[in-house]
Amino acid sequence: MASYAITEAATSAPAGSRRGAPRWLTAYLYILPATMIMAAITYWPILFQVYMSFTDYGLRNLRFDAPAPNFVGLENFISLITNGVTVIPNFSFWGMLAFNLFWTFSNVIFHVTIGILIAVILNTPGLRFRGFYRAIFILPIVVPTLVVATVWRNMFDTDYGAINQGLTAIGGIFGVTPDHFHIRWIDQIDPPIPGIPLPLSYFALLITNIWLGWPFMTIVATGALQSISKEYYEAASIDGASGTQQFFRITLPLLRPAMIPAAMYGLIVTFNLFNLIYMVSGGGPLRQTEILVTTAFRLVNEQRLYGLAAAFGIYTMIILLVLTLLTNRITKATESYV
Amino acid sequence: MALAVPRRRRAFFRAGWGKQLMLQALLIFISFTVLFPLLWVVSMSLDPRNISRPTELTLIPPGASLQAYQEVIERPTSNPVSLAQLAFNSFGLAAGVSLGSLGLGVLAAYAFSRFHFPARRALMIAIVAVLMVPSVAALAPLFVFLNKVQINSGDFSFNLRNSLLGVGLALTSGALPFAIWNLKGYIDTIPKELEEAASLDGASPTQTFLRIMLPLATPALAVTAFLGFLTGWTEFVMSWQFLTNPENFTLAMALWGITGQYAGNTPWSKFSAMAILVALPVSLVYFSLQKYIVGGLTIGGVKG
Amino acid sequence: MKLRAIALLTVALVLAAACSGTGGTTTPSASGGVAAGAITGNITLWHAYGTGGSEETALNQLITKIKADNPSAKITVLQVPFDQVFNKFQTEAAAGGGPDLFTAPNDELGNEVRANLLMPLDAKLSGKLANVAPLGIDGLKVDGKLYGVPMLFKAVALYYNKDKVPTPPKTTDELMTMLKAGKTLVQNENAYHMFGWSTAFGGNLMDASGKCVADQGGWADAFTYNLALKAAGGKFETDGGRADTSFRAGQVDMIINGPWVLGDYKKDLGAKLGVASIPAGPKGKAGPLTGVDGWYINQSAKNVDGAIALALALTNAASQKVYADVAGDVPVRTDVTVSDPLVKAFSDASATGFARPQSVEFGNYWTPFGDAVTKIVEGKSTPQAGIAEACAAMNKANKK
């Protein structure tokens, strides 16, 4: 996406006549409506957010006739990374960032892997009821996140949650007593795997978000799969390649150009995934599943520290920009697509 | 790739019965995991006990009734607005965001994909970078800004912030980066030969765009339109912050109104019934567009 | 072609929407007549009561009556979901808009006053609050000035199921004996519902300067006691809905909760439902955090006099009686006789409560003490260490 390496082939204008307005002018006319709206409604508030991040903007500055906030220079930025935020006990920016990154990558890896596998299965020649499955698999995208988050939170309930009930039923087959499945998915503080500082609620969130995220990747992968020429597989079959070999040597490499931008989009969305975390675990227990954006929300909503939250937003953008540029460098898959 | 015709059933017997059965079992299992939480909502909506979670794994709860549906249909919120009005507003907002982001987005995407102009790369990065900025602290300044657009003359008064138009503009602007990114990715994959031919025949860029590009980009247009629709249909945070006139309220706002109650006292049956009423129309829109959507989601693009 | 299909769908959806109901429209416009009552002009009012709940019913009854009595007033009522109401009010009021008045607990009062969003009412209300309990008036004061018309007390108490617990425990020792004898109690595991125990054990949260002094005794004892309750079978829930469900279903004998669930509990338990104050401890009565629901007047209100007149009408003795009878709420007025013994019990609980402070310092109570409750109840920290840590964090945030 955000690449500096632009291949000329993708950008050069179609050869042809140049009568009428200069082509660059036409281009600007095409872009103008979108940029005008975005300038007023998206960029202006973002710029205002940049301004706020250098001030101690709070609720008292919100009123139209209120005094301007005090300019505090880089104080917000510095106090964040030096853990100087005192309104949240044991605040650790770097700890939170580490969790945020781990959260993001662990989710996207599952989304992409499961998404591709299901797309490949759905693309199997001769598969029956394909349309039916495709219709069902879109549902997680269509149902409002508010509903999804609320339902999953209740499903992780210790006593009546469907997850524990289901586990009990399965465990019963193998003679495991029900009290083994009194799992406190959201509340348990101790990490389930000793030595790995991830609470159970992380896994609950992961399961929920996998449910929510793979169908998007399946749609992308399905589109790309259908563009792979059958001849590759026919040639490979003649050479005696097995199905597995074909998957790794043909399917995966040819899916790459489609999946990497989709994965990057997934990274951005998951990194800032507010709704789900806020509604399922609330960042708990003890803020162990809090990410940057949920913390920024707390600063605004509970403490009205707009300035500090704005600095959070700027950091988030810088981190994501670096992340995507790095990924882009490493994969080089999208170089012609910005 | 968009032009590739799906090969339906052509090689039915290539997948042997054993493999077919195995795949079907697997897909039924996956369908089950997808449907399970949704069936739970259905079960709760029929449950007269108003509980937050069914106590047993049955689809039809004891004493099932449609009362919750009747209640939310008759009185979806405390405010004086009917379900029909809510649905109408939701539809208007969603359709507006959908068409707005599609129309503006495809123009910009076409320019980014096909034209060479100064600051092209910088502009594209600036647009995509918007996706990375969380807007948590930006809602208040946006409110103040839109609130400045007010017209008051006699009996007529209009405040852009306190209108569906204002919310729609804000949502459209928010949906544009993704729309432009995805549409550009798709247009990049469309071979340029057709446009070049048209251009040689004397068509202007605009004619080429309208007659050649748009029809070829149908799958990406369908996806973008659908996602824009979804954005408008499900939004509630900004709407609750901006709108005060019940005549402008939407279904998603009503749904949040049921769940965001004092001390967490959610009437679960009504919440579930409302959730189904909210999710159903989007699902219908999706299914009606489904044919075009597969293959249209190509953010960043697939090399064609 | 395909576009037609989409268009058809559009039409179908719109038609479906149009046919699916013919709900209410907005209130009819005001009659142009001369004022018959004290309330005049256009008044916009916000509340955050749950749809179909008993508090909403009470308010609607009162508004209908007030509208009939004051034909020249045009009152517009808007319900906002509770968790959006403060945010929405603050942004709107900051932009110079918003309602003339709104009602909510005094959770955000201090912040809103410091942001200059609420109107000071001392002069306008002088002499009009003679029959209001001092705790109610103090609850709506910030730095000595009054910023609202007090209406209801909100504090938690002990609900019990009379089938299982014929006489409620009066002291912490009695409660402990009951749990050891097999009775059950569920508590919401948070810094709000559990606040009251601290007073019963002689704890004090802050000194006069706003410095946290909870680590100087009392608080840790209260939590030591709660851990003993847990060991004796006491339950703690982080999810309030779950705790409610278990009590309403009769699976648990006692629960600590506020008057806002009284209506729901009554529906399920009927005559079996009893309410008592949280048991008194070795150092005195329990002091649950007592909030006050008031009517706040927007600093940018267009119709200040109308708004104040309406707030007074909604909080007069007759109106508070309606809230008490219909919704089970606790009136702040001393001249309202409460007939329902359950409401009476809440009234007693509120009277001994700890008035919710509106200081900046108290704003930093929630997160550190919320953490402390979790850590102590989950056994991650001893009561002494947990409270000391929370107190230190609170003082650090407040720069004390």
Image: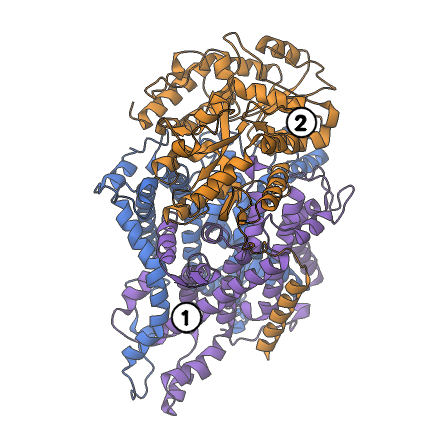
Chain colours: A blue, B purple, C orange
Badge 2: residue crowd in 10 Å (few <14, some 14–19, many ≥20): many
- Point out which mark residue A311 bears: none
Q: Nearer the viewer, residue B215 or B8?
A: B215
Location of residue C108 with respect to C174 vertically, above or below: below
Horizontal side of residue B299 vs C342, given as left or right: left
Q: Amino acid at mark 1?
A: Leu
Question: Quadrant location of the C terminus of chain A?
Answer: bottom left
Q: Nearer the viewer, residue A275 or A7?
A: A275
Which residue corresponds to mark 2?
C247
Q: Nearer the viewer, residue C109 or A288?
A: C109
Quarter of the view holding residue C179? top right
Relative image position of residue B62 (x, y in whole percent): 78, 41
Horizontal side of residue C35 vs C177, given as left or right: left
Location of residue C29 with respect to C45 vertically, above or below: below
Question: Quadrant location of the N terminus of chain A?
Answer: bottom left
Which residue corresponds to mark 1?
B104
Relative image position of residue C99 (x, y in whole percent): 46, 46
